[in-house]
Image (cartoon, helix red, strand yellow):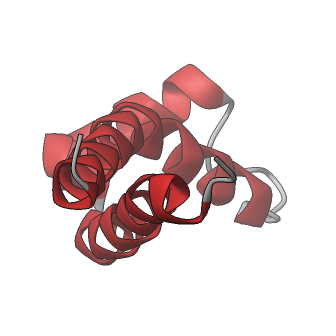
Amino acid sequence: ISSNVQFISGGVSGIASLVMVYPLNMLRVKLALDTYSPRYYGGSFPAIRQIVAVDGTKGLFTGLSLSLIGTFTYRGLYFGLHSVFKPK
């Protein structure tokens, strides 16, 4: 398999995994930054309901585009260059 195919495959797999995990990571950050007393979010599920009610479903993916570029590049280079530098 050529390095180009491995680069594209690595990038696409990185994007697929990021799209699946990103809402959970964003939720983790929002809960970690929730230092108000009383807390703005009452837990994971109330936080998801609040985010979707205020921003819609796209609120769960706020900031995803920059992460997609970085992940595609990183995973693409990782898989694409692996076969080039792998000891034979």
Image x and y of residue 10, in percent:
34, 47
Residue 56 seen in this snapshot: no
Looking at the image, the residue that sits furthest to the top is 45
Occupied quadrant, residue 70: bottom left
Residue 38 seen in this snapshot: yes
Q: Residue at x 30, y 41 (%)?
A: 19
The foreground one among 75 and 79 is: 79
Looking at the image, the residue that sits furthest to the front is 88
The foreground one among 44 and 42 is: 44
Q: Residue at x 73, y 66 (%)?
A: 33
> In the drawing, does residue 41 fall left or right of residue 71?
right
The foreground one among 17 and 11 is: 11
How many numbered callouts?
0
Q: Residue at x 35, y 72 (%)?
A: 73
The foreground one among 43 and 61 is: 61
Measured along the vertical axis of the image, is residue 40 above or below residue 47? below
Image x and y of residue 49, in percent:
37, 29
Q: Residue at x 35, y 61 (%)?
A: 76
Looking at the figure, which quarter contains the N terminus?
top left
> In the drawing, does residue 76 fall left or right of residue 79?
left
Measured along the vertical axis of the image, is residue 70 above or below residue 81? below
Image x and y of residue 67, in percent:
38, 69
Image x and y of residue 7, in percent:
28, 58
Measured along the vertical axis of the image, is residue 73 above or below residue 71? below
> In the drawing, does residue 78 fall left or right of residue 29?
left
